[in-house]
Amino acid sequence: MRMRTVAIIFLTAATISCRDAGTEVPPDGTGGTGSPAVISGVFPDSAAVSDTVLLVGSGLGDAPGASAVSIGGRTSTVVVSWSSTRIVVEVPAGSTTGSVSVTVGGQTSNTLAFRVLPVAEARVSYSGQVVPLFTSNGCAGCHGGTNNLFVTPHGSLMAGTSNHGPVVTPYDGEGSIIVKKLRGTAGFGNRMPQGSGPLNEADIQLLARWIKQGARNN
């Protein structure tokens, strides 16, 4: 009888122990999934030291500290913004062509290729170069409200309230709708500017470069 009682107590204790072990959260910050951060894109995929780049993905953490971005073998120490899906940081000094990764809670994400340029691109000015480009080609006159798109001032252009949503995606020049519309590759509507010949390639590249550099209000 005593042996039977002891066996029951042992089995009960073992069951409780197993249940408790199953509810513990591992100290990796992943909530028990063990899944590392995932980077789905880096924009641009080439830049010089001190340039800013955008990383998009999932599980990127909510703030730097326990999390870190590595670019070309160096940890970026200048953070512009950080969320679980978007990180903007500067390319750190000493980085070399290689890859980009994010470490969250001790676990490192996948890596994406990244090229470090020897010299930073000249900054494109919104007020000094982009606005005159819009004005001289009739864009500002037409899109001062057409399709709910305003190309000036900067805040209106970046508001993302056009009939097609955000037309500028900072750090992704060629992927932005406004550049695709100028190239005629948007997949909807006419090529812009409507009613006149297309912009020359140099002007389109200038706009794309401004967006790639972060679409700053400069």
Image (spheres, grey):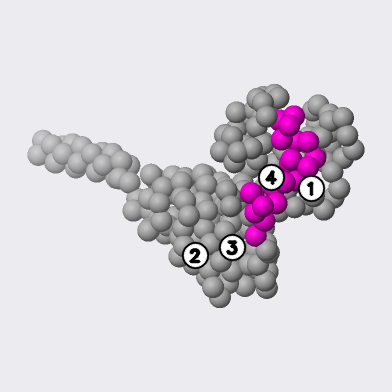
Residue type, mark 4 in image: Val
Quarter holding the N terminus is: top left
Q: Nearer the viewer, mark 3 or mark 2?
A: 3
Q: Nearer the viewer, mark 2 or mark 1?
A: 1
**Residue 196: x, y in percent?**
88, 34
Q: Nearer the viewer, mark 4 or mark 1?
A: 4
Residue placed under numbered mark 3 in the picture: 51
For this view, does 202 lie left or right of residue 84? Answer: right
What's the CA distance linking mark 2 and mark 1?
A: 31 Å
Residue type, mark 1 in image: Ile
For disc 3, the neighbor class at 10 Å (few under 14, some 14 to 19, many from 20) is some
What's the CA distance linking mark 3 and mark 2?
A: 11 Å
Q: Secondary structure at mark 3?
A: loop
Please tell me whether residue 46 belongs to the stretch shown in magenta: no
Circles 4 and 1, Cβ within 8 Å, touching? The answer is: no
Q: Quadrant of residue 64?
A: bottom left
Residue placed under numbered mark 4 in the picture: 131
The residue segment tinted magenta is: 123-143
Residue 107 visible? The answer is: no
For this view, does 81 lie left or right of residue 143? Answer: left
Q: Nearer the viewer, residue 142 or 34?
A: 142
What's the CA distance linking mark 2 and mark 4?
A: 33 Å
Residue placed under numbered mark 1 in the picture: 204
Q: Quadrant of residue 146?
A: top right
